[in-house]
Image (cartoon, rainbow, N blue to C red):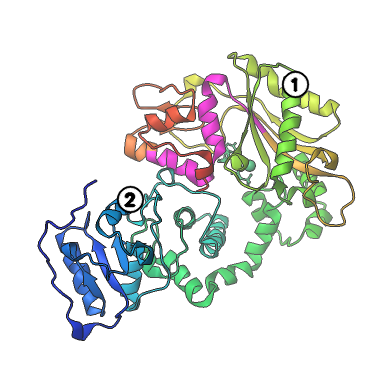
């Protein structure tokens, strides 16, 4: 990348002193990727608000704020060092969002979205609408907004309003990807997926520290009841709604109602309610990995066990622990799950097991209709985990002296030639997966799911996740960057 240093004539001339309001803020706009009309618009705007602006050949040691629309930090810093070696320590090198915020507020805002030296962070101006083109770690700088969006999304989900539900999920996902906290609406100007409604909620949160719409939902009886009922393992939104319509409002109501038949899963859900609704820690996940590893090795030493789901994305806590198990020899995977389940039973640690045999059939692929569940053999388990097996102890309530807890574990067992697709699909996050499939469909006219990638003429082979990203023309995103 070449940045022009002093070849162009001074364009917007010296600021007119009589309009200057902020003497100690002296801006320099890096012109690359700005375009003439945009540049002159920004210049006019800044001057009209009383800022001092330097342009092109006028880069001087007086400059205090360097603003760049193109945030490739490394080349920007190289250029700065060449032409302004003296006072770089005193210069704020900023993203354009600081500029737009300041213009909106009519004063230099304090929030400084800096472009640190050596950073390669995605520039604000090019945040993709697809989560699979963003890098999202577990560090969320915008939790106050995303928590609010999550409540709204869930409330729409309970009302089966998919459109608004997805809109809030997408908005939350975009904000989670930002390496900085949104401090004003102006900073969101260039972000995708933020509609009027989301911005109105953000405005409330910015001004009042909370959203009244969200508070209203949180105190709404229907929302609270559905939330409570669906927190039980085995109870989905449909069942919760049915119970709510019958006038049931609490667990006591449900358990006292003789006309209600709880299935095995729901009975276990109530039995271990406290444990299952309590987050699983990383240390507990590690211990479970050892248990699954051992159970698998007892069957075939060559078996492959991979931790997937949220823990593979680097999360500290999860609602369950997800594993993929398979064998290098195609077809041999069929014996795995039934045998693992047996092994766990023999150890006396299997508290619940819902085994679903494989319905996978390559001849029925690709599927043009999206299905929430894949066709691989899988089992949803509840295991008994002993405190003695967990480094640092169990993640349980203070005063709980049982010495064990129940944990949810999912195992899925694809044939080895489907391994990469299953791993990619089960690593999540849900939003990341949704956007991978959407990107494949809309941008590449391909079909992606947990089983395969189809380009409308043939199935594309993949042995690693990297192969799949490459087929899709996407930069590889590491698991810990998929927390969209
Ligand atoms: P989870 O529900 O376990 O979520 O599904 P998570 O990301 O690990 O988060 P927590 O911490 O447990 O709450 C993991 C991934 O597996 C996919 C989901 O879409 C998600 O991306 N999945 C789950 C499937 O593809 N198929 C299934 O049948 C179940
Ligand atoms: Mn999980």
Instruction: Residue 12: give x, y in percent of width and height.
Output: 14, 70
Q: Which residue is mark 2?
A: 72
Q: Which residue is mark 1?
A: 339
Query: Principal SS element in the magenta part?
Result: helix
Q: Disc 1 vs disc 2: which is toward the camera?
A: 2
Left or right for 317, reference 72: right
Please say whether residue 236 is visible from this viewpoint: yes
Element type at mark 2: loop
347 to 254, vertically: above or below: above
Q: Magenta stretch: residue 463 in it?
A: no
Instruction: Residue 346: give x, y in percent of width and height.
Output: 85, 26
Element type at mark 1: helix
Q: Which mark is residue 449?
A: none
Q: Which residues are magenta?
A: 411-439
101 to 382, vertically: above or below: below
Looking at marks 1 and 2 on the same chain, the residue that comes earlier in the sequence is marked by 2
Please say whether residue 163 is visible from this viewpoint: no
For image coordinates 24% across by 46% down, the residue present is 1
Instruction: Residue 115: give x, y in percent of width and height.
Output: 38, 57
170 to 91, vertically: above or below: above
């Amino acid at each position: 990348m070449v940045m022009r240093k002093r070849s162009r004539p001074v364009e917007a001339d010296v600021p007119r002193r009589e309009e200057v309001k902020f003497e100690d803020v002296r801006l320099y706009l890096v012109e690359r990727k700005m375009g003439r009309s945009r540049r002159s618009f920004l210049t006019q705007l800044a001057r009209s608000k009383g800022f001092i602006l330097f342009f092109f050949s006028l880069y001087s040691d007086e400059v205090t704020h360097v603003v760049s629309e193109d945030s490739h930090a490394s080349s920007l810093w190289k250029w700065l060092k060449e032409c302004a070696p003296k006072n770089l320590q005193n210069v704020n090198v900023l993203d354009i969002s600081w500029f737009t915020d300041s213009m909106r507020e009519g004063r230099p805002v304090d929030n400084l979205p800096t472009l640190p030296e050596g950073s390669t962070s995605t520039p604000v101006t090019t945040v993709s609408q697809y989560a699979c083109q963003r890098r999202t770690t577990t560090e969320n700088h915008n939790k106050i907004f995303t928590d609010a969006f999550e409540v709204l999304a869930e409330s729409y989900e309970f009302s089966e309003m998919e459109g608004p539900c997805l809109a809030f999920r997408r908005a939350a996902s975009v904000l989670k990807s930002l390496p900085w906290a949104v401090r004003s609406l102006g900073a969101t100007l260039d972000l995708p997926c933020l509609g009027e409604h989301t911005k109105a909620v953000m405005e409330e949160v910015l001004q009042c520290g909370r959203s009244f719409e969200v508070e209203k939902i949180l105190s709404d009886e229907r929302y609270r009841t559905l939330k409570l009922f669906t927190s039980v393992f085995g109870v989905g939104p449909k069942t919760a709604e049915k119970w709510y319509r019958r006038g049931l409002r609490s667990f006591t109501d449900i358990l006292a109602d003789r006309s209600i038949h709880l299935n095995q899963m729901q009975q276990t859900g109530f039995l271990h309610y406290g444990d299952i609704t309590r987050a699983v820690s990383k240390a507990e996940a590690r211990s479970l990995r050892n248990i699954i590893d051992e159970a698998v090795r007892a069957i075939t030493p060559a078996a492959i066990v991979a931790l997937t789901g949220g823990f593979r994305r680097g999360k500290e806590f999860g609602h369950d622990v997800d594993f993929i198990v398979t064998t290098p020899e195609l077809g041999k995977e069929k014996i795995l799950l039934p045998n693992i389940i047996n092994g766990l039973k023999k150890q006396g640690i299997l508290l619940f097991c819902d085994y679903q045999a494989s319905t996978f059939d390559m001849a029925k692929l690709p599927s043009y209709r999206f299905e929430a569940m894949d066709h691989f053999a899988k089992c949803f388990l509840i295991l008994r985990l002993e405190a003695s097996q967990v480094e640092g102890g169990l993640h349980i309530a203070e005063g709980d002296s049982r010495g064990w807890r129940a944990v949810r574990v999912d195992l899925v067992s694809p044939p080895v030639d489907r391994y990469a697709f299953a791993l990619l699909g089960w690593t999540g996050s849900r939003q990341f997966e949704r956007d991978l499939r959407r990107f494949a469909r809309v941008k590449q006219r391909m079909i992606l799911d947990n089983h395969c990638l189809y380009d409308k003429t043939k199935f594309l082979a993949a042995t690693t996740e990297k192969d799949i990203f490459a087929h899709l023309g996407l930069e590889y995103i590491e698991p810990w960057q998929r927390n969209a």
